[in-house]
Amino acid sequence: MSKSNSGRKFHSPFQKPIVLVGLMGAGKTSIGRKLAERMQISFVDADHEIEKAAGCTITEIFEKFGEKEFRRGEKRVIERLLKSRPCILATGGGAFIDPETRATIKNTAVSIWLNADLDTLDHRLARRSGRPLLQTKNPRATLQSLMEKRYPIYAEADMTVDTIKGSIDVTVDKVCESITDYFSLTYEQK
């Protein structure tokens, strides 16, 4: 296992937001907070901002208005957040699946897919409730189905970082390395 660089500060070499995408349980919020701290920029959770704008929880939005209306509001909130200052933005699991939201992210930000396997997601999500899409008889099968549908779309992100059970700091190190590699390649291509 490699040594974590969690004590080192990492400075963003660009002025675009970094958007974390992936399924629920991939670690977007936890990793996003640590990454923002390390990069010394702000962290924003899109789901939290959606709840603030709507004045109710995401579960309540799904129950009262349905997923389609939730996605409309999510798109508007993400567009607003991406127009503000550079930040680390953790999106909901379905945000990048919407073609218009995905195009907005691709045009205004750098996207990172936090990829996790089924066992990791199932383990992380078993401890939590309140995930509207997992209110089914077989949440693991639902996760598997979401993976099959969404992973090919998440793969369109600028970078992919595999998240595993264990230290958040190790995963944040991997994200920082991916960002550095991505921008080294981007700068070399010019």
Image (cartoon, grey):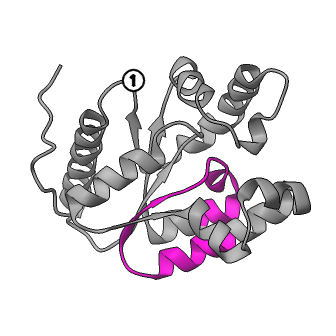
- How many numbered circles are shown? 1
The answer to whether residue 60 is left or right of residue 97 is right
Residue 32, x across and y down, in percent:
38, 52
User: Which one is in front, 75 or 38?
Assistant: 38
Element type at marker 1?
A: loop
User: Which one is in front, 172 or 152?
Assistant: 172
According to the picture, the residue beneath numbered tag 1 turns out to be 165
Residue 89 located within the stretch drawn in magenta: yes
Category of crowding for the residue at label 1, using alpha-carbon neighbours closer than 10 angstroms: few (below 14), some (14–19), many (at least 20): some
Residue 6 located within the stretch drawn in magenta: no
Residue 147, quarter of picture: top right
The answer to whether residue 37 is left or right of residue 65 is left
The answer to whether residue 72 is left or right of residue 179 is right
In magenta, the rendered stretch is: 75-103
In the rendered image, the quadrant that contains the N terminus is: top left
Above or below, 91 relative to 16: above
Q: Amino acid at mark 1?
A: Lys
Residue 72, x across and y down, in percent:
77, 68
Above or below, 92 relative to 56: above
